């Protein structure tokens, strides 16, 4: 699990790389310091010693040979070096210094002088009559200077050897401190790597989380990176992209909902068409069966059908009923399938109602109905006169056909809320409450036997609904205290 997390985590990768880089850089730097410290230390010491030797030569120039011992002692105490003075003949001079190298004669051939505080050996070799001074040191640098005493002729030579160790103290101190330095460097590298990796990867991790939400189509977020670099620009770009994707997704959902609604509406219309034609076939089948039976009986001279005059009249009635039904079916079919547009002409709806009352006067007289009309003159609507006349005819004929003899029909037209309204109320009959929502459906009958007896096709109110919808109008049927009220509300012209 830990290995997988290390392999998949960008923060861990950057942390490890940064820590290794810092640790490696610190280690290399420390190694360079350890390597360069001895030579640097020696160079600095030599430079300082050169200056001190030159300063000593200047002081000795103002001193006699006999008084130079204290000056040399002060120099040797301050510098911590070994020194000897050789005369013009190359012989080592006894200056009286407590710290300077003194001559000790062992034999005629060799003179060895050893200072207990130094690891350097000085020897004087006598070869024939020529004498020379040879200074031998172990890995040390010897400084020489020409010395002039104002009371002595000739040039004296001063030999100075610094007391250097093979490994200087600075290097020893660094080596002793190396474990602690490495531990400090490790802790410092880890802390810097942690802060650096968090600083670099934190916005990237946030952007990665945002990208995951976008992949899940979740746009309820906002990247709050205020940086001015490329990461901040990427965050702002993600915000813009998320906003555009959210808008596009919202529009797509709205389009899908609209399309789904249109598909549902189309399926519903198709279902209604199938139901309509199925019902139409059933309605046509009944009169055809009756007509076929009557004609067959008359042709065969069976019993009651021998009276052909009587049954021919009945057959004619059945044929007229079939013709009316077919005409209504064709009208509805043309209006639904061909989307016939209404003629927009100015119509006085009250005048249309008066003409229709005159056309239905015989039916009203036969049923002994009492008709009262309160019609507002000049009630204007816009539409197709013939189609609106057909709708009003169906409403008025329904009121006349389904009212008991001697009942009343009340007609009223006028304005309600600046909109034209027509009401037709017939008394003496009521409609069951559960049947009211279905009365405008095709072939729906509240009572099958009564409607067939009155000659209704079941398409009258359905045709009324289609015509009024084409004119932006609505029709409502409600029970009143005395009967049934049909209310037609036209749109405001």
Image: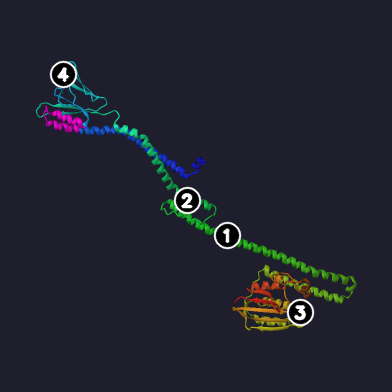
Q: Position of residue 409 (x, y in %)?
A: 71, 81
- Quadrant of the rendered structure where residue 127 is? top left
Which tag, 1 or 3, sits closer to the chain's start? 1
Tag in front: 1 or 3: 3
What kind of secondary structure does the magenta stretch mostly adopt?
helix
Q: Secondary structure at mark 3?
A: loop
CA gap, disc 1 and disc 3: 55 Å
Mark number displayed over residue 404: 3
Going 85% across and 71% down the picture, which residue do you hit?
295
What span is colored magenta in the figure?
Answer: 52-78
In the rendered image of this protein, does residue 274 appear above or below residue 365? above
Nearer the N terminus, badge 4 or badge 1?
A: 4
Q: Give the residue pinned by disc 2.
A: 206
| In the image: residue 259, left or right of residue 171 | right
Instruction: Assess whether residue 53 is covered by the magenta stretch.
Output: yes
Q: Residues within 10 Å of mark 4 (few under 14, many from 20)?
A: few
Q: Are marks 4 and 1 in contact (CB under 8 Å)?
A: no
**Relative height, residue 276 to residue 108 (above, below):** below
Q: Are marks 3 and 4 in contact (CB under 8 Å)?
A: no
The residue that disc 4 covers is 130
């Amino acid at each position: 699990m830990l290995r997988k997390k290390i392999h998949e985590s960008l923060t861990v990768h950057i942390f490890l790389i940064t820590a290794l880089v810092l640790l490696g850089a610190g280690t290399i730097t420390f190694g360079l310091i350890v390597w360069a410290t001895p030579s640097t230390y020696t160079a600095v010491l030599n430079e300082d010693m050169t200056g001190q030797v030159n300063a000593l030569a200047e002081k000795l120039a103002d001193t006699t040979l006999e008084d130079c011992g204290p000056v040399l002692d002060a120099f040797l105490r301050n510098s911590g070096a070994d020194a000897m003075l050789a005369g013009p003949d190359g012989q080592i001079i006894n200056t009286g210094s407590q710290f300077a190298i003194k001559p000790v004669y062992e034999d005629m051939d060799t003179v060895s002088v050893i200072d207990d505080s130094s690891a350097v050996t000085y020897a004087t070799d006598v070869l024939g009559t020529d004498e020379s001074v040879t200074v031998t040191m172990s890995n040390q640098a010897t400084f020489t200077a020409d010395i002039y005493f104002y009371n002595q002729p000739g040039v004296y030579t001063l030999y100075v050897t610094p007391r250097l160790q093979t490994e200087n103290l600075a290097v020893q101190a660094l080596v002793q401190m190396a474990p602690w330095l490495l531990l400090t460097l490790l802790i410092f590298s880890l802390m810097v790597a942690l802060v650096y990796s968090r600083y670099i990867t934190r916005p990237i991790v946030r952007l990665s989380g945002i990208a995951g939400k976008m992949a899940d189509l979740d746009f309820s977020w906002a990247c709050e990176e205020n940086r001015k670099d490329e990461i901040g620009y990427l965050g702002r770009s993600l915000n813009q992209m998320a906003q555009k994707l959210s808008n596009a997704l919202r529009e797509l959902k709205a389009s899908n909902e609209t399309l789904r609604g249109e598909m549902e509406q189309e399926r519903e219309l198709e279902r209604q068409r199938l139901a309509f034609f199925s019902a139409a076939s059933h309605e046509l089948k009944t009169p055809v069966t009756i007509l076929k039976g009557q004609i067959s009986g008359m042709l065969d001279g069976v019993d009651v059908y021998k009276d052909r005059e009587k049954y021919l009249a009945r057959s004619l009635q059945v044929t007229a009923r079939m013709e009316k039904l077919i005409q209504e079916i064709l009208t509805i079919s043309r209006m639904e399938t061909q989307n016939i547009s209404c003629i927009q002409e100015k119509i006085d709806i009250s005048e249309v109602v008066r003409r229709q009352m005159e056309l239905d006067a015989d039916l009203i007289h036969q049923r002994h109905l009492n008709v009262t009309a309160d019609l507002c003159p000049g009630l204007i609507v816009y539409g197709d006169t013939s189609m609106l006349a057909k709708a009003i005819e169906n409403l008025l004929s329904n009121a006349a056909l389904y009212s008991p003899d001697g009942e009343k029909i009340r007609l009223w037209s006028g304005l309600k809320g600046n909109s034209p309204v027509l009401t037709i109320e017939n008394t003496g009959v009521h409609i069951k409450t559960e049947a009211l929502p279905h009365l405008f459906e095709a072939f729906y009958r509240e009572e099958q036997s009564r409607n067939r007896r009155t000659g209704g096709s079941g398409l009258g109110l359905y045709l009324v609904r289609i015509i009024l919808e084409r004119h932006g109008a609505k029709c409502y049927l409600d029970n009143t205290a005395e009967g049934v009220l049909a209310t037609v509300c036209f749109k405001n012209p």
